[in-house]
Image: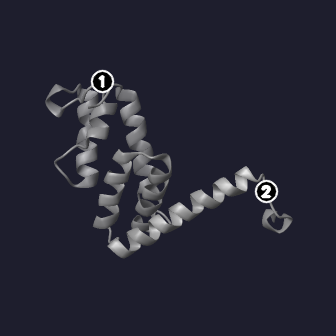
Amino acid sequence: MATCGLIEYEDATAEVRAVYDDIRAVRQTESINNFWKALAHDAALLRRTWESVKAVMGRGELDPLVKEMLYVAVSVTNQCGYCIASHTAAARKAGMTDAMFGELMAVVGMANETNRLASGYQVEVDERFRT
């Protein structure tokens, strides 16, 4: 259960409803995810976060599947179960296969392991990597 509960559309302020309407239009869906409903307790935070997500996850140089897989990788590392579920679903919708997911998890696990080893051993960065 969300710390402060969830704000449903019918209970939302006009400002929150406007953000919900934009989420629905951009994502071409009738549903609003619980993440947004939780943020709706602070309309300014909701709007700011939605605008940032639209900007970062929208059209750009990276393919939408790549963006979603990166989001999954960071979410796994940060142990955010909600974001893992949400962005795994989005990545699958964008074409991620079971084999791709398995390989992604292998890379995430390896990166986390070697990152911790390099940090623990306080390995200095090779000069050739600095250029």
Q: Position of residue 34 (x, y in %)?
A: 26, 39
Amino acid type shown at disc 2: Val
Q: Is residue 59 visible?
A: no
Q: CA distance from mark 2 to mark 1?
A: 43 Å
Q: Position of residue 50 (x, y in %)?
A: 38, 42
Give the side of residue 53 with respect to residue 90, left or right: right
Tell me if mark 2 has few (under 14), some (14-19) or many (20+) residues whose alpha carbon lies within 10 angstroms of its own. Answer: few
Q: Nearer the viewer, mark 2 or mark 1?
A: 2
Indicate which disc, 2 or 1, sits on the residue closer to the N terminus: 1
Amino acid type shown at disc 1: Cys
Residue 44 higher or lower than 66, as above or below:
above
**Residue for badge 1:** 4
Instruction: Give me the disc on residue 124.
Output: none
Viewport quadrant of the C terminus: bottom right
Res 103 → quadrant: bottom left
Report the coloring of the rendering.
Answer: one colour
Residue displayed at 78% across by 66% down: 129
Q: Position of residue 62 (x, y in %)?
A: 48, 66
Give the side of residue 105 with respect to residue 26, left or right: right
Element on which disc 2 rests: loop
